[in-house]
Image (tube, rainbow, N blue to C red):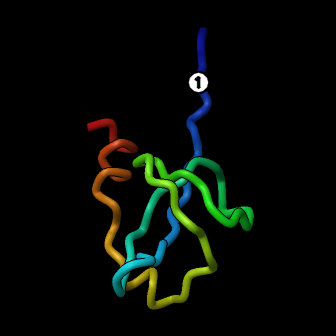
Amino acid sequence: MHTEQAQRHFWLPIPNENVPGGVRHAFRGARWEGLASTEAVCGELVAMAQPSELDWIYFPTCTECNSRLKGV
C-alpha cells in the first residue's frame, strides 16, 4: 500500500512594491521562517515581511496560487 504525505503550504500577505496594496500568496512549507524573499506557488519571487492585521483583511488571494493548489 502506497501512502503520500500531503505537502504543506501557508499563505502570507505580500505588499506590492510599486503601488499601494498587495496580494496573499501561498508558499511551500508549514509556516514563514523569517526568510527575506522566496518564490510563491505561482512562481513569483517576492520580498517577505511580517504582515499587519489589515494586510490579511484587505489583500486579495492570488488567483494563480489558489488555482495551482486546487489543481485546476
- Where residue 47 appears, as percent x and y from the top left, is 57, 67
In front of the other: 1 or 30: 30
- Where residue 6 appears, as percent x and y from the top left, is 56, 36
In the image: residue 51, left or right of residue 57: right
In front of the other: 71 or 33: 33
In front of the other: 59 or 1: 59
In front of the other: 64 or 46: 46
Q: Quadrant of residue 17?
A: bottom left
In the image: residue 15, left or right of residue 39: left
The C terminus: image quadrant: top left
Question: How many numbered badges does the structure rendering display?
Answer: 1
**Residue occupying the point 44% across, 46% down:** 43
**Residue occupying the point 35% across, 87% down:** 20
**Residue occupying the point 41% across, 76% down:** 16
In the image: residue 28, left or right of residue 54: right
Q: What amino acid type is highlighted by mark number 1? A: Glu
- Where residue 39 appears, as percent x and y from the top left, is 54, 51
Element marked by disc 1: loop
**Residue occupying the point 42% across, 68% down:** 24
The N terminus: image quadrant: top right
Q: Is residue 23 above or below residue 63?
A: below
Residue marked by disc 1: 4
Q: In this view, does 37 lie above or below 60?
A: above
In the image: residue 27, left or right of residue 65: right
Instruction: Give neighbour class at mark 1: few <14, some 14-19, many 20+ (Cα, 10 Å).
Output: few
